[in-house]
Image (cartoon, rainbow, N blue to C red):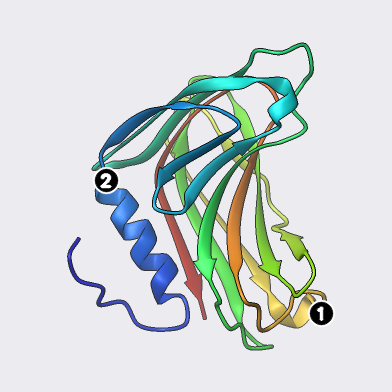
């Protein structure tokens, strides 16, 4: 995609996701793996996670991760930078994710907001469940009920925390919205 015609406070993030939808790349997975621009796969370095990822038009990301060490990973995740999205007190921030997996797998979704010192994590209430049949997941955060989420932040990430251990999943589409 050549033009960034998206509008609104979430425009940069939606443009990044649109670019990922059309991206084509393959690579090996390590403790920190750059998928595209600042989209990052991250895992516990002590567990020796290895694997592969593939992006291609029509499928945002397919990945296979396997811990090779003796220790179960403390985390395995995908970080999608959202930029400094301003969120009004009455807003709703939502995600829609289309996925599938050869064996059932659960994923926790989190909105991470940067602060001067550290960050604040707000997990979505529903768990993304992926299984053999393609499925669509929808969840929202209602800001009026979340006083700990800063309305203004220098940066935000959408994070998908995969279950610790072997992960094999296809993320066909990821969309965010702010209303």
Q: Position of residue 120 (x, y in %)?
A: 77, 65
Q: Position of residue 4 (x, y in %)?
A: 26, 73
Judge by depth and name the residue closer to the eye, 91 or 121.
121
Q: Residue at x 77, y 21 (%)?
A: 72
- Quadrant of the image for the N terminus? bottom left
Among the 4 quarters of the image, the one containing residue 78: top right
Total marks in image: 2
| Label drawn at residue 120 | none
Q: Residue at x 81, y 79 (%)?
A: 147
Which of the marked residues, 1 or 2, is nearer the chain's N terminus? 2
Q: Nearer the viewer, mark 1 or mark 2?
A: 2
**Disc 1 to disc 2, how far (Cα)?**
37 Å
| Label drawn at residue 23 | 2
Describe residue 62's horizontal placement relative to residue 79 as left or right: left
Judge by depth and name the residue closer to the eye, 99 or 18.
18
Describe residue 61's horizontal placement relative to residue 93 as left or right: left
Identify the residue at the far left of this view.
2
For the residue labelled by badge 1, is the local secondary structure a helix, a strand or a loop? loop
Q: State the residue position of label 1.
A: 147
For the residue labelled by badge 2, is the local secondary structure a helix, a strand or a loop? loop
**Few, some or many C-alpha atoms within 10 Å of disc 1 (few <14, some 14-19, many ≥20)?**
few
Q: Position of residue 90 (x, y in %)?
A: 66, 88
Describe residue 30's horizontal placement relative to residue 23 as left or right: right
Q: Residue at x 48, y 64 (%)?
A: 176
Q: Position of residue 52 (x, y in %)?
A: 44, 23
Judge by depth and name the residue closer to the eye, 50 or 96.
50
């Amino acid at each position: 995609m050549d033009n960034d015609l998206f509008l609104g406070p979430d425009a940069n993030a939606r443009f990044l996701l649109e670019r990922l939808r059309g991206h084509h790349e393959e690579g090996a997975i390590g403790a920190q793996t750059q998928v595209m621009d600042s989209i990052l796969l991250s895992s516990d370095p002590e567990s020796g996670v290895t694997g592969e990822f593939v992006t291609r038009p029509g499928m945002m990301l397919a990945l296979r991760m396997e811990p090779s060490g003796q220790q179960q990973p403390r985390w395995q995740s995908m970080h999608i930078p959202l930029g400094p999205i301003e969120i009004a007190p009455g807003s709703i921030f939502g995600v829609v994710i289309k996925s599938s997996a050869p064996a059932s797998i659960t994923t926790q979704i989190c909105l991470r907001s940067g602060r001067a010192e550290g960050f604040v994590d707000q997990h979505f209430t529903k768990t993304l469940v992926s299984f053999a049949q393609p499925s669509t997941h929808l969840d929202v955060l209602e800001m009026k009920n979340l006083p700990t989420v800063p309305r203004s932040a220098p940066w935000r990430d959408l994070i998908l925390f995969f279950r610790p251990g072997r992960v094999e999943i296809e993320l066909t589409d990821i969309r965010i919205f702010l209303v």
